[in-house]
Amino acid sequence: MTNKATTVVFDVGNVLLRWDPRNLYRRIFTGATEMEWFLANVCTPEWNVEQDRGRDWDEAVALLVKQHPKHETAIRAFHERWHETISGVFEDNVALLGDLRIAGVPTYCITNFSGAKFREARERYPFLAQFDGVIVSGDERLLKPDRAIFRLLLDRYGLVAEDCVFIDDSPANVRAARDVGMGAIHYVEGLDLRNELRAWGIRGI
């Protein structure tokens, strides 16, 4: 730890927003077994990540409906009722983001997110529009933990890696940030990010 970070870079999903497709599908399926089968075999993480990589949602839905016509309604729900996959926010972390802004600390974001869904989320959660800069995987067609998406942030906004501390819930993404020279914090629910950032030298919070 260098204790000299001046800039904070956030992930969004499960750092600021509470995201889980189960938040939606518990309302669709009557039992956990059926729901988990659907998420493991139909609307899989591998399928969803391609939207984070930039695939069009209509194309993605049509692909699965063709493969699993009996599940058409549930498949379409992932797109049409996507906002229900978010159950709320991490209140302490959102408050921290606001305090960083008040303190004049530059804040940025790198998120694996469909471009269309990020814009939808930004309308529902206005704090997502307050970053000094944002890199959305679906718009850039780059996914964490590809080191290129971290370099893109640095290059686009003229940042120095060693000045940045990155927060993410994925260990792989944390390692990637460190590989390009950024400081990084692996977030798990309950971690006091405010104290973590103070330890990295962030002041005013």
Image (cartoon, rainbow, N blue to C red):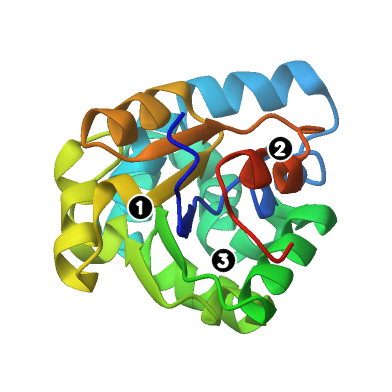
**Three-letter amino acid code at the position of disc 2:** Arg
What residue is shown at x 57% (from left), y 78% (from top)?
104
- In the displayed structure image, the side of residue 201 where residue 115 appears, left or right: left
Secondary structure of the residue carrying tag 3 is helix
Mark 3 = which residue?
80
- In the displayed structure image, the side of residue 138 where residue 111 appears, left or right: right
Mark 2 or 3: the one toward you: 2
Residue 163: image tag: 1
Secondary structure of the residue carrying tag 2 is helix
Mark 1 is surrounded, within 10 Å at the Cα level, by few (under 14), some (14 to 19) or many (20 or more) other residues, namely some
Vertical position of residue 8 compared to residue 193: above or below: below
Q: Earlier in the sequence, mark 2 or mark 1?
A: 2
Q: CA distance from mark 2 to mark 3?
A: 15 Å
Q: Earlier in the sequence, mark 1 or mark 3?
A: 3
Residue 22: image tag: 2
**Three-letter amino acid code at the position of disc 3:** Glu
Q: Can residue 20 be seen in the rendering of this structure?
A: no
